[in-house]
Image: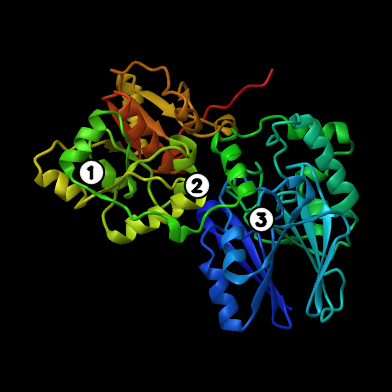
């Protein structure tokens, strides 16, 4: 059997292509499906089946387009209530392709319709060979239980416990585990960096599988959940209906500097996708920076929302196209256009350029001791609780979707995150909100710790 994992780092998303005797199956495809078609063509496979392990909430799936372009059949958990042609599958459903087969396990908990796919290959001595676990079981973690509008997190966590212990942990220890996400995804909170594991390894090392009782498991899983982005529910509904083909997206419209200035004056959003250092050196006043170098699409969806229609600002055509496809992967499609000529055109038009100051962690420490500079930490709760700069204000970047922190607009603020990516996003939102004395901390808290500077911790009574 042929088996390939496709890993999309910017979304921490894993999808799969399996094939035997020329017949191929794709599992949890990303929005842009050409990579599966290319792989199938290279190996002379015919894609006949597409499985979704659940209604993904953090990205838009390409299952509908892939089926349309190949004639493949789509399979989903029976509780998904999908609105496109598909085969609803339940426990025990089996699909044979060539000398391999897939057996479905219904594993509700992360979502009601979640399924896992047990893979058997006649050409391998051990059976079953692997299990594709979707968002039910991750490497070092399990799926978050708070994505249902009809069930409480505690109810879902109870279902997840049963799915894990009655279904997945009933598999032999040698069975390989391939999840739909890796470290960095918001679908869990404690994932390891590895891209695969085994049932035996997870049985021994996965923190969520160590609780001696269902009650303790539910309590642990429902506490300290990472913030759930508002766009998750919308992406799940997009996937329930099936997204349109990327080829149907309208071409980006070029926008002149004068038109962009008028749009910004009316409250429209300009999204600068250049690296943080480039943005700090010069940018369109009021624009927000979410660089392509990090989890660009996830932060754009979380902070701007799927209904946003920003004007893109980029340094090249390649950056524009990359931004366009990555935004479409999470469901941001109706862009207003792009700044023709980029920042150079803005300058040439005689418009003002804004900058954001930056400082090292040593400079930050020096200024804290001398002039009372306010530190703003925009990391997530678990990061903050593990250690932070003493007397810092904590306001996670996720909260910027609702409002900026309640800090004096005229105060001098040094903003930091873990490594510098999120802090520049925060700086741009603060500037847009009217803060004027903003400094980005280069290297973030990682650099602070590397310099052995003092760290404060949360004291638990």
Q: Earlier in the sequence, mark 2 or mark 3?
A: 3
Expressed as whole percent of the image width and height from the top left, the position of residue 449 reads 48, 40
Q: Secondary structure at mark 2?
A: loop
Q: Nearer the viewer, residue 86 or 233?
A: 86
Q: Residues within 10 Å of mark 3 (few under 14, many from 20)?
A: many
Q: Which disc, if any, is residue 33?
A: none
Expressed as whole percent of the image width and height from the top left, the position of residue 355 reads 22, 37
Expressed as whole percent of the image width and height from the top left, the position of residue 198 reads 78, 61
**CA gap, disc 2 and disc 1:** 30 Å
Q: Nearer the viewer, residue 60 or 181?
A: 60
Instruction: Give me the residue at 57% from left, 27% from top.
Output: 457
Q: Are marks 1 and 3 in contact (CB under 8 Å)?
A: no
Q: Nearer the viewer, mark 2 or mark 3?
A: 2
Q: Residues within 10 Å of mark 1 (few under 14, many from 20)?
A: few
**CA gap, disc 2 and disc 3:** 19 Å
Expressed as whole percent of the image width and height from the top left, the position of residue 178 reads 71, 61
Q: Earlier in the sequence, mark 2 or mark 1?
A: 1
- Residue at mark 2: 331
Q: Is residue 418 visible?
A: no
Q: Secondary structure at mark 3?
A: loop
- Residue at mark 3: 180
- Residue at mark 1: 281
Q: Secondary structure at mark 1?
A: helix
> Is 379 on the left-hand or right-hand side of 113?
left
Instruction: Give me the residue at 64% from left, 44% from top.
Output: 187
- Which image quarter holds the N terminus? bottom right
């Amino acid at each position: 059997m042929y088996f390939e994992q496709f890993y999309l780092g910017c979304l921490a998303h894993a999808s799969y292509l399996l094939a035997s005797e020329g017949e191929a199956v794709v599992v949890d495809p990303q929005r842009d499906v050409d990579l599966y078609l290319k792989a199938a063509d290279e190996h002379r496979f015919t894609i006949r089946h597409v499985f979704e392990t659940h209604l993904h909430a953090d990205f838009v799936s390409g299952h509908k387009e892939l089926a349309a372009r190949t004639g493949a059949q789509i399979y989903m958990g029976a509780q998904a209530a999908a609105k496109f042609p598909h085969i609803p599958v339940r426990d025990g459903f089996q699909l044979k392709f060539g000398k391999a087969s897939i057996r479905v396990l219904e594993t509700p908990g992360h979502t009601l319709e979640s399924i896992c796919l047990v893979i058997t290959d006649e050409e391998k001595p051990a059976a079953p060979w692997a299990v594709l676990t979707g968002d039910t079981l991750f490497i070092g973690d399990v799926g978050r239980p708070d994505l249902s509008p009809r069930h409480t997190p505690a109810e879902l966590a109870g279902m997840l416990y049963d799915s894990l212990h009655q279904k997945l942990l009933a598999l032999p220890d040698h069975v390989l585990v391939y999840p739909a996400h890796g470290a960095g995804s918001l679908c869990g909170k404690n994932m390891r960096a590895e891209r695969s594991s085994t049932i035996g390894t997870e049985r021994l090392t996965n923190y969520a599988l160590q609780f001696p009782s269902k009650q303790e498991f539910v309590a642990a899983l429902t506490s300290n959940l990472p913030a759930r982005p508002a766009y998750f529910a919308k992406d799940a509904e997009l996937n329930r209906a099936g997204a349109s083909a990327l080829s149907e997206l309208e071409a980006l419209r070029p926008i002149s500097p004068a038109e962009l200035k008028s749009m910004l004056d009316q409250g429209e959003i300009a999204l600068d996708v250049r690296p943080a250092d480039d943005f700090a050196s010069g940018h369109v006043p009021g624009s927000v920076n979410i660089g392509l170098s990090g989890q660009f699409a996830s932060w754009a969806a979380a902070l701007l929302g799927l209904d946003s229609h920003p004007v893109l600002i980029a340094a090249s055509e390649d950056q524009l196209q990359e931004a366009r496809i990555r935004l479409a992967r999470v469901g941001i499609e109706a862009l207003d256009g792009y700044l023709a000529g980029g920042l150079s055109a803005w300058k040439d038009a005689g418009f003002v350029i804004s900058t954001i100051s930056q400082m090292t962690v040593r400079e930050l420490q020096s200024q804290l001791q001398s002039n009372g500079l306010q530190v703003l930490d925009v990391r997530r709760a678990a990061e903050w609780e593990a250690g932070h700069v003493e007397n810092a204000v904590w306001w996670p970047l996720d909260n910027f979707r609702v409002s900026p922190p309640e800090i004096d607009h005229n105060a001098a603020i040094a903003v930091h995150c873990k490594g510098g990516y999120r802090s520049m996003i925060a700086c741009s939102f603060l500037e847009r909100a009217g803060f004027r004395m903003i400094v980005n901390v280069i290297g973030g808290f990682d650099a602070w710790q590397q310099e052995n500077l003092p760290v404060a911790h949360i004291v638990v009574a």
